[in-house]
Image (cartoon, rainbow, N blue to C red):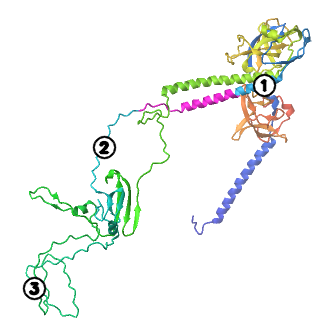
Amino acid sequence: MNLPANFPLKKVMITVVSVVIVIALIITGVTVAVNGKAANATVDVEQVSNISTQYWGDQSSTYGNATSDFVQELYPDKEKAISKIFVKEGDTVKIGDTLLQYDTTKLQLKVESKELEEKKKKYELEQAEKELTKLQNTAPYVAPVIPEPEPEPTPTPVPESQAELYTEITEHSKPFKGAGTEEDPYVFLCTEDAVLTKGFLLKLLGVTDPRATPTPTPTPTPSAEPTAQPSEVPTAAPQPTVTPEPTAEPTTAPTEAPTPAPPIEPTEAPTPAPIEPTEAPTVSGMAWFKQMTFTKTNETGGESVPTPEPDFTLPDGPFVARFEVHEQDNENLPLVKGWQMDGDKISAGFFNEVISEPDDIQMPDLSYADPGISYDTGGSMYTAEELQQMIADKKQQIQDLKLNVKQAAHDLEKAKLDLENATIKSTVNGVVKSLTDLDTAMSTSSPFLVVSGGDGFYITASLNESLLGKVHVGDTVMASSWENGQMYEAEIVQISDFPNDNSDYYYDGSSNPNSSTYQFTARIADADGLKNGMGLDITLKAASDNASNAIYLFKAYIRSDDGGKYVLKVGDDNRVHKTYIKTGKTIYNQYLEIKSDTLTEEDYVAFPYGTSAIDGAKANDMEENTDENDGIDARRLDA
């Protein structure tokens, strides 16, 4: 932009500087105000342990009965070998006393076998899924369209050979085409064993044969009137007579010499000899030979009748000749071999044009096709209906394999439990009622060791096989009585190694009704109000795979912005600071899992909403505000 010469540039500079100073003052004022507000603001905080909970897994329900005379029975197991028995019949035992020890070597081998079985089932499932994908990507078979047989084409008639076949090529051999030049050489049809004579080679090279008869010089044709006698010219030496070329008209009389000569007798005009061409004709191919063919017209006016051809002699060279061997000795059929000779360059050029077949020829697979017919099956030998059925069968197979994988995983888990529980302990306070040998117990299908208890109450119930490995001996269950309405706490003392014959009394709606159930026994420490045979509703707490010491913080104390979720955590300076966290799943619709290590149960956080919830605000006395925060009662957050 061009400014006028008298433009007040100084005023513009002053204005710009003033605006910059004003903006800087505004920013500084806002920053000071915010910092001052944060420095003077106070906010109530709450300890994390008061506003969080822990998650130990899902609950499952079942039904059982209370009994006052619980009996512990041990049955023989073919897959387990007992290494030692620690009690005898009549011994008094307490809960936790060791009864017997199984051989861990065999149990360890069983675990390894189950691990291999599980891997095998998983591999079979993976292969079946790959086969399903392959079937789904397979194009169905397309029935080939068999073309109607086409009539055999009428063979094109091959013209008869018009060229003469030579086994010996002489100076009198006729080429069937060509002008003798390098661009259009003479072409001879010959056999493979044809030979070239000396006479032909001399013609080719343009060399005169010294044995050849010289061509007679033609005599002049006498005129109608007698010519004057030539006079002798007296000379010292006789001059040779020049023979004039014959012409159609009579020649003029020569100049008379002073001395008259005797008269020359008139003779009959001789027939002119044929003129031999001294160079290649300008007309090539068969046209040249037509020029050399003499015909005469029938006197009756009919078609011309060819006269016998005179002896043919090739012109003096040098010229170019080519010798060709054709199929069936016919120049109209394909060339077999040939060679060329140039009389001017004294060279021979060979031009065999026979095409040899390749050594490696890939032949198509015609094992499923009729000879002579090309089929396009669409890349498959299965129809659309067959493919659809195969896909359905494969899907069913995959479902069965998935169940097999689950069963293998369950068997592996059970084998691991057997290994962990190789030492069998007493689950009741009582007496060893009977101890028999394994063979007798196995033959009668009866327990070989029985411990009878006489004190306290026990709960006998069943759990689903899906809970094996999640519910353990020593876990606590809660039972409620239908009759007296009381709640009882019981400790699991035994889980059976064998599935029940039926699961009629297991009613957990979240479990598979077709799965097996296993009986377990729990001991009730405080059994006031219980009666023998009383029915009880039992709640099991199954440990989740994700169960841990993770903190589940009340959602109201978590806020988010563009940087993610954060809490206002109290720092070492006793002020709250925005601290970003990583979160997980939500439980009970109120608590959010804290997955990062930036927050512990001992930390303090502020409620992140309200006018006092400012990054940098001072935390109020933390001990006085552990129960309430901005009007929220932390003790009722779990309610």
From the image, tell me which residue sits under label 3: 263
Residue span colored magenta: 119-144
| Residue 341 rendering spot, x and y as whole percentages | 37, 64
Image quadrant where one finds the C terminus: top right
| Residue 141 rendering spot, x and y as whole percentages | 47, 31
The quarter of the displayed image where residue 95 is located: top right
| Residue 79 rendering spot, x and y as whole percentages | 78, 18
Amino acid identity at mark 3:
Pro
Which SS class for mark 3? loop
Q: Residues within 10 Å of mark 1 (few under 14, many from 20)?
A: few
Pointers 3 and 1 in contact (CB under 8 A)?
A: no
Amino acid identity at mark 2:
Pro
The quarter of the displayed image where residue 163 is located: bottom left
- Mark 1 to mark 2: distance in Å? 82 Å
Q: Is residue 551 above or below residue 157?
A: above
Decide which of 93, 346 is in the foreground and name it: 346
Which SS class for mark 2? loop
Which SS class for mark 1? helix
Marked residue nearer the N-terminal end (3 or 2)? 2
Residue 347 seen in render: yes
In magenta stretch: residue 615:
no
- Mark 3 to mark 2: distance in Å? 77 Å
